[in-house]
Image (cartoon, rainbow, N blue to C red):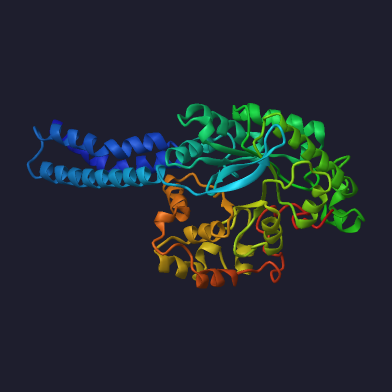
Amino acid sequence: GISELINSIASAFLLFSPIFFQLCMFMKSRSIASAFLLHSPLLFSRTTAVAATVVSPTFVPTCIAMSATRSGRSSKRQKMASKASGDMATANIPTVALQTVDKDNKKISVDIPCIGLGTYKFKKDSGQAKQAVLDALSVGIRHIDTAFIYGGERTEREVGEALAACTVPREEIFITSKQWRAYHGFELTRKCLNLSLKRLQTPYLDLWLIHWPGPAYNTMSRSNEVMQNSPEGAFAYAKDGHSEADMVALRAETYRAMEDAVYEGKCRAIGVSNFTVKHLEALRKTARIWPPAVNQIELHPYNPQTEIVEYCRNHGIVVEAYASLGGQDSGKKTWNKLGGKLIDRVEICDIADKHVKSPSQILLRWATQQGCAVIPKTGNVDHMRENIAAVVEKGWQDGGLDEDDMKRIAALDQYETADDKARLCWVRDPLKHLEFE
């Protein structure tokens, strides 16, 4: 009876342990799942050791052999992960120099790591953003990008919790956040910054950006018919004081508050996001701190934004690319129209095979090789390591993408030919093409 019971327990362990592990991962209990994966061979071997005194000789050797096999695989996996983590944690991640000023308005530069962790679209109040930041820091990433509005205004809190819990000194971490459009204007922008600093549990930001050059809306229930028939277009739904005629002066006041934040030591550098040449030229007329350190824009081979990239390069503005792999906002219909997801394009896959890299690494390298910083979002530690390897020079025996690679990727540009101009982000905003003053 006892032998049969233990036999049943051991058999059940073999049968259900993979299911338990998958359940842990599904429920985001990474720590429990990892511990289970690590110790399951040991637990199983102890079960079989007890069984050895009472179970038939044919059952025990089989169980022990299976346990040894699993233990060997687990050990190998741990060694590989440890080596990869160690390599990447000490990797020399390239940086890009940002133009800024100090408190006395003296021109200085600040280095931004060219690879960071994006935190857009982590599930609200799930702890995913916090865990991702901790994981990113553990593998050597030192650049964290977030925003006031992410996660329904909850993501900054999780990033702050991670910063408070980690052992990496604050001065070694580059933190970017973004002012939200509902806070356009001088006083509201100052309020927005103070809220962000409180949530992030830090006295300063390394980089603070105007998130969006357009208006805040007074409702998200916008009628296409109303916008099409109104002479104001989408601005018919703009918040009071956010009319198209107001926007240039409103952005100037927003930026003035950000400049004051630099002089007060609350920001090391300031910049913009989603700005066109027109928006930057308007800002230039009133800015005390020029150029803005960064323009963070959607940038990928389908939408390389040649005009704004060239403008930024000529004016000393660093381009930071988001949606480098295609973003998270577009659906199957859009991808089919463009010829498929970027990571599935035969051109990208061929180049990846040529360099023994993943398609994602090719896309990230394409951006950084043009002098851009990138901030891919992931909660997967292996992908974080892979992203670092895409930009670290020692990971490229041939020095990176060659001229033929860059030409082949450039041929994927569909900004002018696609019906929707290959805009893969801000898809629900009627002003996503930024065709306003």
Q: Is residue 78 visible?
A: yes
Residue sitting farthest toward the right: 231
Q: Which is more toward the observer, 355 or 331?
A: 355
State the residue at coordinates (48%, 65%).
401
- Please state, as top left, top right, bottom left or bottom right, where the N terminus lies in the image: top left
Residue at 41% x, 37% y is 30
Asked if residue 317 is positioned above or below residue 16 in the image, the reply reads: below
Residue at 70% across / 44% down in the picture? Answer: 271
Residue 231's x, y, as percent?
A: 92, 56
Query: Given the current orientation, which residue lies at the most extreme left position?
Result: 57
Relative to 415, say whether 166 is above or below: above
Report if residue 118 is visible in the image.
no
In the rendered image, which quarter is residue 188 located in?
Answer: top right
Residue 47 vs residue 42, the one in the foreground: 42
Q: In the picture shown, does residue 32 fall above or below 284?
A: above
Rendering coords of residue 417 (x, y %): 70, 71
Residue 27 relative to residue 333: left or right: left
Q: Whole-percent x and y of residue 234?
A: 84, 52
